[in-house]
Amino acid sequence: MAQIVLKQIEKSFKQEKIIENLNVTIEDGSFTVLVGPSGCGKSTTLRMIAGLEQQSGGEIWIGDKCVNGVEPGKRNVAMVFQNYALYPMMTVKENIEFGLVNRKVPKQERERLIKEITEIVGLSEYLNKKPQALSGGQRQRVALARAMVKNPAVFLMDEPLSNLDAKLRHQMRTELIQLHKRLGATFVFVTHDQVEAMSMGDRIVIMNKGQIQQADSPMKIYDDPDNVFTAQFIGTPPMNVIHREAIFPYMEGQLHSDIHQVGFRPEKAMMTMEKKPIAGCVQFSARILTRETLGAEIIYQLEAKLGLVAVKSFLKPLEFANEVQISVPMKDLYYFDHEGKRARQYERSEERELVALGGGYA
Amino acid sequence: MTVWSRLRPYVMVAPSIAVFSIFFIYPIFYMIFLSFYNWDFINPVKEFVGFNNFVEMFQNSEFLQVLTNSLNYTILSVSLSIVISLGLAMWLNREGAWYGFVQGALFSPHIISLVSVSLVWMWLMDPKFGLLNAILEMFGMQKLDWLSSPDSSLLSLVLVAVWKGVGYNALIFIAGLQSIPKDMYEASALDEANRWRTFYKITLPMLSPTLFFLIIINLIGSFQVFETIAIMTNGGPVNSTNTLVFYIYEYGFRYFKIGYASAAGVVLLLVVGLLTLVYFKLLSRRVHYQ
Amino acid sequence: MTTASKSIVRVLNVTAMLVLVAIFVIPFLWMISTSLKSYSETVIFPPKWIPSEIMWSNFAAAWNSGPFLKYLMNSVVVSISILLLQFTTITLAAYAFARYSFKGDKLLFGITMVTLMIPGQLIFLPVYLLMSKWGLINNLLALILPFSSSAFGIFMLRQSFKQVQEELIEAARLDDAPEWKIILKIMVPMARPTLVTFALFSFIAHWNDYFWPLVMTTSDAARTLPIGISKLREVDGGAAWHILMAGNMILVIPILIVFSFAQRQIIKAFVYSGVK
C-alpha cells in the first residue's frame, strides 16, 4: 500500500521559512495524527502531501513513488476538509460521483461504488439532497464518502471534526477509528486538539514552529516526552514544569548543573492536610486557589512558593482545606536541560511505573 | 510548473485585454493625437497644427456657450437629483408591499431607453397639445414654451434627467441607509437627539460614501448627456441646449472637422478624468467614519 | 401623538405617495393613451385621456413606416451576441484575476479598471475612424466587438469568484478535475447570482442603447430598434404623435413586462452595480 516519507522538506512563504528540514515517515496503514498549536506547520505539511501546496525543497514519497510535481488528483490521496468543502450546487450523489467522473470510471461501476459507500456511511436516503439540507454530521459523512469512493491509499484529514458539536465529535471519532480498521489505508489526521490526537492516533507526530518535536505512540509520548514542549502539550492539565532554582530547596540530594527545569505530571502529586515527611519525595506546602470538579477527578490550582502548580486528584477529601502539603515522588520527576530537551540520564526513572493509571495516593 | 500552466492566465485575460486596449485605451491616445491635427476624414493627409485647435476652440463663442451649457446642465441636474432622491430615500426607506411598489415605479424610467423617455417627454412638453401645459392650465397657470424657447429648453432637459435619475439614486441611497447599523439610531434615541440632529450627526456622515459615489457618478453621467439633446432639441433653439458630446458629434460627423472635434473630446476627457481621480482619492481616504 | 393626528399623518403620507407614483406613471399612461388615438384626437386642447375610437392601426402604421423587422432582428442579434461573448470573456478573465498571481497581473487589472471609467461618449470618434478603416461601418460587428468584454463584468465576477472557498477548488483538484471543469462546474454555478445580475444589466443597457448604433451606422442594414423608433419623428414632419407613441410602445413594452416580472432582481442588479 502506501507509506509516506517526507525527506528534508522545506517550506517558505515569501521570505519566511515556516518549515525547515522536516523528516518523517508515516507508516503504511497507520493512523497518524499531526498535532500542534496553530501555526506550527501541521496543516501545511498535510497540504504538501496532498499536493495543494508546493514544498520549497525536499522530497515527498507516497508508496514507492516520488510525488514532487505530481498533480493532487494523481497522487492517489483523498482529503477531508475542516469545513467539508462539499460542492453546494451538486447533490450528495453528484458530490460523491464527481471524482469518479473525472477519472472516467464507467457509469455502472460508479453506481455500484456509490451504492456501496453510501450504505457504509448511512447516507442512502439522502442521495438526491443538496448538502445545505443536511446536518453537520451528515455533511461530514458525505465528505468521508467522497473520499472513500476513490479508494485512495492515503486519507488526509484536516481538522475534520472541529466544526461538530462535542457529542457528535465523540461519535465521529469512534466511527473514524472503525473506518480506519476496516479500510486498512493510511490515515493522516491533523488536529490542534491533544485529546483528539491521543484518543485517535496509533502514532502521534507533535509539531511546533515547523519542527517535529516527537513522533511516537500516544502512551510513549505521554510517559516519556522528549522535551518540555511535548511534556506540556500533551496532558490535561499540562505537566508542571518548575525552574531548578525554585524547586531545588525542596529536593533531597543534588541537582546536576545540566538540569535546567524539573517537571511532574499533576496526577503524580500527593496532597495531604498535615505535614509529614515521606522519603524519596519532593515536599512543599501550597494554598488552594481553585477547584475544578470533573466528576471522577478534581483538578486543583495551587499557589506555592515555587510557583503555580496544578494537581489532579481522584478522591474528594480536602474539600474545605486551604493550606495543603504536596509530595511528589522523586522517581516521577522529569528533568530537562537548558535547551528544553529531556536529561534522562539524571532521572530516577527506572523505578517509574510505565502505565500512567490511577492517582498518586499511596 | 509546466509551460502551459504558466501561460494559462495570460491566455485567459488576453481576449478581454485585447478588447479594452483596442476599443478603449488606444482610442484615447489616438484622440489626443488627432487633436493636434487638421483633418477632414477624406483627405489622406493630416496637417499638424499644434495647439491651434484648442486655441481656436477657446476663442469660439459657440464652444464657450457649449461649455457653459454643459456646466449649467450638470450642476442643476445633479444637485436637484441628489437632493430630491435623498429626501425620497429617507421617506421611502420602509418595509412593506406599498413601499416596494412605489420604489419600483420610481425606478422604472431607469431601465427604459433614453429614446423612449425623450420621445414621451417631447410629447408631454408639446407647447400646443402637450399634457404638461394642459395641467398648468388646469391649475390656472400660464402655458410654457418648454423646449421651444431658449430660456426654458435647458431647464426642460434638466427636468427629464431628474425624472429619469431620481429612482436609481433613491434606491442606492436606500441601500446605503439600510447598511447603517440600527444600534446607532437606538443610541441616538437614548440620547434624546431630535430628528435633524440625528440626520446631521449620524445619517449624513454614515451615508457619505454613498453620497460621494452618487455625486461623482451623476456628474460624469451628466457631462456626457447626448440622447435627450439629439432627439428632443438638436442642440437648439439657438444653441441653448448644445452640450459637449453633442458638439463633438456634430463637428465630427456633420462638419467633418475631426481634429477640432478631437480637441473638444480631449476637454471632455480632462473633465471625466479629473472627476474620476477625485472619486478614487476620496475612496482611498474613506469618506465615512467606521 | 394622539390617534387623530396619527391618522392625519397617515392620510397625508398615502396622498403624497399617490402623487409620487402619478409623476412616474402618468407619462407612460400618456404614451399608451396617445398610441391609441387618431391623429385628430392628438390635436385637441385640452387633451382627452380616453380615445373615442381605439386605433390599433397605429401600431401597424408605425411598424410599416420602416424596416422594423430588420431593426428588431439587429437589436436581438447585437444584444444576445454581446451577452454570450461577454459571458465567455469575463468568466475567463475574472477567474485568472481572482485565482492566479502572474507577472503583470496588477497592470492588466489596472487596464481593466481604467476601462471601467471610460464611457463610450468619450471615445466614439476615434473608434469610428478605426471601424471605418476596417470597413465595419454599417456592420453589426461594429456594435458588438467593442462590448465583447466588460470591465464591469470582470470586476463583479472577480469579486464573487474570490468569495468561493479555497477548499472547494482544492477538493475539486483532489477529485482530479481539470481547470476548465473547475471553472464550469464549480465557479460558474457558485457565481450564478452575479452572472444573472450582470446579464440583466448588460442586456438592458445594450437593448436600449441609442448612442453607439447611431454613431456606427449610416444605413438601415445595421440599425437597431432605438434608432428606428427615433426615426419615426420624420413621419409626417414630426407631427404624427400617435404613430410615434405606438412605435415607442414597441420599444418600451417588452422591457416593462420583463421589469414587472423580475422587478426585484433587476433593481438589485442595478443597485448592486452602484454600491459594490
Image (tube, helix red, strand yellow):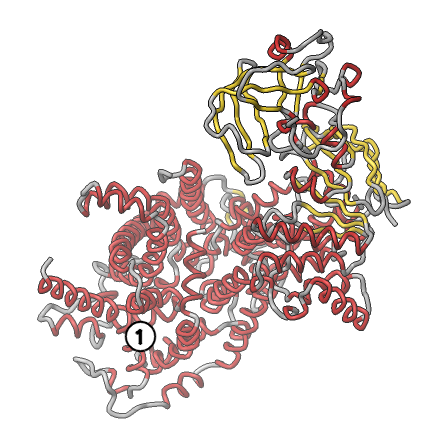
Q: Position of residue C253 (x, y in %)?
A: 40, 77
Residue A35 figure quarter: top right
Q: Position of residue A280 (x, y in %)?
A: 69, 15
Q: Position of residue C71 (x, y in %)?
A: 50, 76
Q: Is residue C215 left or right of residue B140?
A: right
Amino acid, disc 1: Phe
Q: Which residue is mark 1?
A: C28
Q: Position of residue A274 (x, y in %)?
A: 54, 18
Residue C166 appears in the picture as rendered: no
Chain ID of residue with mark 1:
C
C230 relative to C124, above or below: below
B256 relative to A186, above or below: below
Depth check: C201 or A27 in front?
A: A27
B267 relative to C70, above or below: above
Q: Is residue A223 left or right of residue C243?
A: right
Residue A153 appears in the picture as rendered: yes
Q: Residue furthest bottom?
A: C53
- Circle 1: is it few (<14), some (14-19), or many (20+) Cα within 10 Å? many
Image quarter of the C terminus of chain B: top left
- Name the residue at 58% across, 62% down: A134
Image quarter of the N terminus of chain B: top right
- Name the residue at 52% across, 51% down: B39
Depth check: A59 or B282 in front?
A: A59
Q: Is residue B225 left or right of residue A137?
A: left
Residue A145 figure quarter: bottom right
Query: SS for tag 1?
Result: helix
Depth check: C128 or B176 in front?
A: B176
